[in-house]
Amino acid sequence: MHSVSLRSVTFHPRAQAQSNKPAESTQGNRDQTLQQLLTEVRELRLAVQRATVSNTRFQMLIERVRVQQAHVDALSRQLESLHSQVAEFKATKPQMEQQIKDAEDLLDRTPDPSAHADLESRIKGGKANLVRLAQEDERLRNRETALDTELQSAQAKLNELNSQMDALMSDLKGP
């Protein structure tokens, strides 16, 4: 009978280590690939979250700009209306003063007591109207000043919101 030497049947530790290396290397590559994929998924999730937050901020900012622009427009219209009213009062005052002067001149030349009383009543009414006109003119001018200040403040706020929107758009464009 032939005898088989144990040497030929037994595995050498070196041969076993060499045969395990490709399996370990393949498993290491898989682990590394999975780690890279997991990192990439996390980065994508963060990017989506940032985009969602940026989109929400952008939408809110757009709405705030829209509301503020409407406010500025309304204030501008009110101010224009006040300017027109002040101009009307300014034009009306000399006319009223002239009517009072004309009535006073006529009063001196009117001998009829009934016409005289009527002219005095017209003069008195005209002077009262002139006083009311002056008071209303002052009230309108004060309102005009306040409205102008409010408009400037609202415009500054609108400009700030537009600056914020520009900055957000620059951030969205990225480097």
Image (spheres, helix red, strand yellow):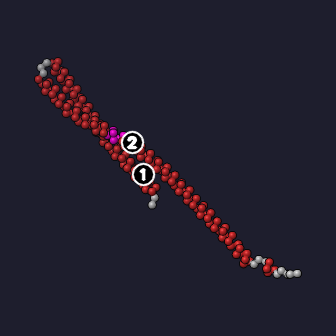
Reading the chain from its start, which is encountered first: label 2 or label 1?
2
Which residue lies most toward the right here?
A: 1
Quarter of the image that includes the N terminus: bottom right
Q: Callout 2: helix, strand or loop?
A: helix
Q: Residue at x 32, y 40 (%)?
A: 79
Residue drawn at x 24%, y 29% as measured from the top left: 129
* Left-right relation of 134 to 1: left
The image position of residue 25, as x and y in percent, is 66, 70
Quadrant in which the C terminus appears = bottom left
Which numbered disc covers residue 113?
none
Q: Amino acid at mark 2?
A: Ala
Mark 2, residue position: 70
Please give the residue where the numbered disc 1 appears in the rendered image. Answer: 165
Q: Label 1 crowding class (10 Å Cα cut-off): few <14, some 14-19, many 20+?
A: some
- Left/right of residue 127 with respect to residue 52 in the rendered view: left
Q: Amino acid at mark 1?
A: Met
At 21% from the left edge and 28% from the top edge, which residue is drawn?
A: 126
> Which quadrant of the view contains residue 14?
bottom right
> What range of the chain is rendered magenta?
74-79
**In the image, residue 165 above or below residue 123:** below
Q: In 3D space, how far apart are the residues under numbered discs 2 and 1 (Cα atoms)?
A: 17 Å
Asked if the stretch drawn in magenta spans residue 151, the answer is no
Q: Nearer the viewer, residue 45 or 106?
A: 45
Above/below status of 40 relative to 165: below
Task: Quadrant for residue 23, please give it.
Answer: bottom right
Please determine whether, in this image, residue 49 is positioned above or below residue 139. below
Predominant secondary structure, magenta span: helix
Image location (x, y in percent) of residue 172: 46, 55
Q: Secondary structure at mark 1?
A: helix
State which quadrant residue 116 falls in.
top left
